Amino acid sequence: MAATSRASKLALFSYILLGFVWDVMGTSLTSPRARTLQYLDVCTEIASAISGASAVYYPLSFEYDSNIEHWATSSTQESACSVEPGSAEDVGVILQIVNKTQTPFAVKGGGHATNQGFSSTEGVHISMARFNEVVYDASSGTADIGPGLIWDDVYSALAQYNVNVVGGRVTGVGVAGFTLGGGYSWLTNQYGLTLDTVQAYELVLPNGTVTNVTSSSNPDLFFGLRGGFNNFGIVTKFTLQTFPQGQVWGGLIIYLGDKLDALAEATANFSANNTDPKAQIITELNSLVGLPGATLSIFYDGPEQPEGIFDEFLAIEAFSTDVSTRSFLSLVQSAPANATANQRAAFHTVSVSNLSQNLLDVIVNETTFWGSSLCSLFSTGTFVSYDVEPFLTSLFTHGSDSAYPPSRAQGLFPVNLYYAWLLPSGDDYFLDAIRQSAATIQAAAVAEGQDVADAALYGNYAVVGTSIDRIYANNVDRLGSIKAQYDPSNVMGLAGGWKFSA
Ligand SMILES: Cc1cc2nc3c(=O)[nH]c(=O)nc-3n(C[C@H](O)[C@H](O)[C@H](O)COP(=O)(O)OP(=O)(O)OC[C@H]3O[C@@H](n4cnc5c(N)ncnc54)[C@H](O)[C@@H]3O)c2cc1C
Ligand SMILES: *[C@@H]1O[C@H](CO)[C@@H](O)[C@H](O)[C@H]1NC(C)=O
Ligand SMILES: *[C@@H]1O[C@H](CO)[C@@H](O)[C@H](O)[C@H]1NC(C)=O
Ligand SMILES: *[C@@H]1O[C@H](CO)[C@@H](O)[C@H](O)[C@H]1NC(C)=O
Ligand SMILES: *[C@@H]1O[C@H](CO)[C@@H](O)[C@H](O)[C@H]1NC(C)=O
Ligand SMILES: *[C@@H]1O[C@H](CO)[C@@H](O)[C@H](O)[C@H]1NC(C)=O
Ligand SMILES: *[C@@H]1O[C@H](CO)[C@@H](O)[C@H](O)[C@H]1NC(C)=O
Ligand SMILES: *[C@@H]1O[C@H](CO)[C@@H](O)[C@H](O)[C@H]1NC(C)=O
Ligand SMILES: *[C@@H]1O[C@H](CO)[C@@H](O)[C@H](O)[C@H]1NC(C)=O
């Protein structure tokens, strides 16, 4: 035991050292800065066109560094400059300049995209950081929320009113990309995805015009923004429905590797048996530098432990348990999402309709198989994680037509695969592995009779290279025609992400 732990610490240390040496060499030998120089004139033009509410920053400044930074280092690129618009009008000015000069650009909210280029660029990086207000309106029961915020800030601002919004489940995740892509929350069984709770978007259209989009003012754009990310412009405000929120019960339990099978079985039992929409879990089957382990986040939307529901989990011997009655924010911050930040990372996903015992067994096997093969001393992998998210099959019945999910008829649960590694030279290898593993899980679900061969994948989890047909399915044509109407010159095509073509 002690020897294993010493060996794994040594291994981890070696990876970090190797990664550091590589990074230092990489920066000096293949600096992308030369490529960004050509965009400096565009930065200057933006700086002179924007109002005093906004500012442009350059490399080596603190603001620039924090603007381009991401949760995953592989999602960070060095841009020519960063700009922090302070008004929707200035966002419009910036869009007109990047279009006129055909400059690649990025829009970043909370920077949790796990695909490179989705909120990063070598051109002009737009950080939404100055859109950081939360304004609660008790009479309408809504909150106006800035796209520069992370959910932690939103929860803490709303707690004083005893209300909440349907947002992220772990610390640090941004409001903007989460809401524009879908939004699987602790409150989803009760109220739907985050996008189901949006009442209005303030949107800067690709031509620079600022507009308010609601289901009645503009049904097409409203539909497109519900899952369509940055295809239709830049959002400068979300108006979200609020819900009453008191103390919650739950937190984080950590299990050692010999408990993987028991945890998987309890997860299958929970998924098959739970009918209480206030109860949710995320089971994370992990391998840290080749050693299996697991974490379980449990959530109950009430101040006390509900009878029965979580007993099987609590009966499994834990390595550590942090479960209590607490604030919603405290529960969100109990999961160690920051601990695995600052590495290269990929997410991918499989949509399943039944987290059966058989499928859980397959996922446990994938965890140990890829954990031991990717995290050997010579492959620089540090962490392999399979997150199982059993929702109620009614989760999509809380909202109407939206870009994502393309069908609400079948309840689907996103399994989230997450690999982390240290060296850029490993990117292709790890991306390839995560695609293979997802395909294995999907094939196993289909083989046991689940109707998920074409089930839509969640855009916020899908790995780069996934076809938009797999995310938006039969909505792709409609999204293309909305795009043709509002962005005929493809301004938003200069920014990365899942792209609809006119
Ligand atoms: C640790 C971790 C935990 C997560 N947990 C969950 C979870 O519980 N549930 C869930 O559903 N997802 C979860 N995710 C996935 C998450 O939803 C996505 O990473 C999401 O895109 C994050 O939003 P962001 O604003 O931080 O991302 P960013 O990287 O800033 O942006 C993501 C995309 O949105 C676009 N965008 C950003 N701001 C705007 C804007 N103002 N206007 C137009 N386009 C914009 C960007 O251009 C980019 O394409 C998690 C991710 C991580 C890394
Ligand atoms: C996690 O990181 C984010 C972004 O850096 C930070 O704002 C947040 O407070 C951190 N959360 C915790 C619980 O430390
Ligand atoms: C974008 O630039 C192109 C090329 O200069 C121009 O034809 C088009 O009208 C511009 N689009 C918008 C929305 O300004
Ligand atoms: C959008 O709606 C808000 C609130 O109703 C209003 O104050 C604002 O002027 C509107 N903006 C536009 C561009 O119509
Ligand atoms: C799962 O449910 C079955 C049937 O009730 C039970 O025998 C088994 O012990 C449960 N698993 C766990 C881990 O509690
Ligand atoms: C849970 O689900 C399993 C599988 O469907 C079933 O056998 C079992 O009796 C249920 N009850 C409990 C408490 O796990
Ligand atoms: C899930 O799969 C199990 C095992 O194949 C099966 O017994 C169960 O009925 C399925 N549940 C649903 C809701 O389809
Ligand atoms: C475990 O997974 C690997 C990789 O997908 C596969 O080759 C192997 O057959 C699996 N083992 C079992 C017992 O399913
Ligand atoms: C911008 O586009 C919108 C939607 O297509 C249109 O209504 C508006 O008139 C355009 N604004 C300008 C200045 O062209």
Image (tube, rainbow, N blue to C red):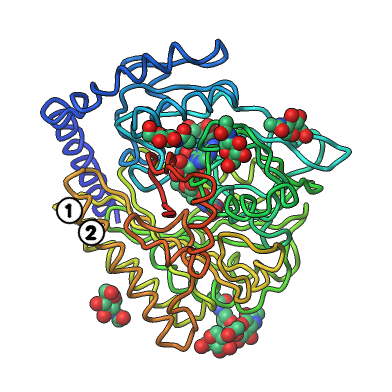
Q: Image point 54% across, 69% down: which residue?
A: 413
> Split into 4 quadrants, where in the image is the C terminus?
bottom left
Q: Which of 90 and 377 lies nearest the eye of the viewer? A: 90
Q: Residues within 10 Å of mark 2 (few under 14, many from 20)?
A: many
Vertical side of 276 occupied by 481: above or below: above
Q: Position of residue 33 (x, y in %)?
A: 21, 24
Residue ID for mark 1:
379
Q: Position of residue 285 (x, y in %)?
A: 42, 63
- Horizontal side of residue 498 vs 413, given as left or right: left
The answer to whether residue 294 is seen in the rendering is yes
Vertical side of 219 occupied by 447: above or below: below
Instruction: Assign a secondary structure to mark 2.
Output: helix
Ligand 4 quadrant assignment: top right
- Horizontal side of residue 93 vs 57, given as left or right: right
Instruction: Assign a secondary structure to mark 1.
Output: loop
Hey, what amino acid is under mark 1? Answer: Ser
Q: Position of residue 269 (x, y in %)?
A: 58, 77
Residue ID for mark 2:
374
